[in-house]
Amino acid sequence: MTALQEAAPRPREGVRREALYFAVRNGKLLTGFGVVAVLLLAGLMGPLLTDVPPNQYGPRPMSPPSAEHWFGTTTFGQDVFTQFVHGLRSTFLVGAIGGGVAAVIGMFVGFVAGYRGGLVDEILSMLTNIVLVIPALAVLLIINAYLGLRSVALQGLFIGLTQWPWAARAIRAQTFSLRSREFVDLARMSGSGTLRIISREVAPNMSSYLFMTFILLFGGSILIASSLDFIGLGPTDAVSLGLMLQNATQWSALQLGMWWWFVPPGAAITAVVGALYVANVGLDEVFNPKLREL
């Protein structure tokens, strides 16, 4: 999944122009990001199209999709479209928080361990391995079960705190391959400190790799959050796509033939995660010259 080159890096402006040239011609990248953008726009703008609270009961329970209720209603008369657009917003929020927290911790640990080496690397690697072998889902189950108030932000934070180890190990390996390059040696000889070298020399030459890592962390956070929501451990102060599936299952939507209750959230989760994967494959083709389709 790496886009790093064995030779010294070319001027960054030229690399950006080349990457942009291939990006606008990559069908996988455009399709993946296009699907994510449409769903993100629906999550941001959709709640503005309705003034009904997502959990408010209505007078027409179990109604199929119609002009009045675009996605139908639940067994309690709740508008499924309203829940859907609010659920999209929560899904993207937990993905951004979880993926962002995991990316920040993973980058810090990976960069420092890979660049410094020695005792620092051994300590950080030991910490990474300890967190890596802990069953993250079991820990999240326990934490969520004992929290009195579960919010989307808190859920994303806990997911990020358990998801970073694999990213740290991957970034550490890439940093090892960069720290002996000539441009890093020149920066070291000029008297630059560790953090300055990492931020100015190492990280910019791994920007494509870091971006793809964040995409994977983003999608992984959404899947973990949806799993927690589906078993009833989702946020207590918000609506999410996973909670919609959990409620549909709990109130026998499949047995009652109320497909409009569970199909939209299930399709949206699949579309977001699948589109992120397709976009990640497209990014790999853009940044890795050996995979480019000319």
Image (cartoon, rainbow, N blue to C red):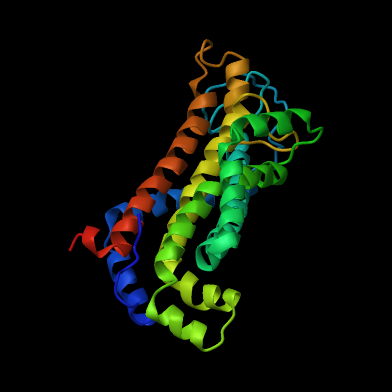
Q: Can the viewer see residue 176?
A: yes
> In the image, what residue occupies the spot 59% across and 21% down?
248
Quadrant where the N terminus is found in the figure = bottom left
Residue 226 or residue 83, whichever sits in front: 226
| Displayed quadrant of residue 205 | bottom left
Q: Can the viewer see residue 100?
A: no
Residue 31 or residue 120, whichever sits in front: 120
How many marks do you count on the picture? 0
Residue 181 or residue 56, whichever sits in front: 181
Q: Position of residue 139 (x, y in %)?
A: 66, 33
Q: Position of residue 214 (x, y in %)?
A: 50, 55
Q: Left or right: where does residue 285 sit relative to residue 53?
A: left
- In the displayed structure, 213 sits above or below 277; it is below
Quadrant where the C terminus is found in the figure = bottom left
> In the image, what residue occupies the spot 55% across and 41% down?
222
Farthest residue in the front direction? 119
> In the image, what residue occupies the spot 71% across and 29% down?
142
Farthest residue in the right direction? 148
| Displayed quadrant of residue 94 | top right
Farthest residue in the top direction? 255
> In the image, what residue occupies the spot 33% across and 78% down?
8
- In the displayed structure, 130 sits above or below 63; it is below
Q: Position of residue 266 (x, y in %)?
A: 49, 30
Farthest residue in the bottom direction? 190
| Displayed quadrant of residue 143 | top right
Q: Position of residue 48 (x, y in %)?
A: 64, 49
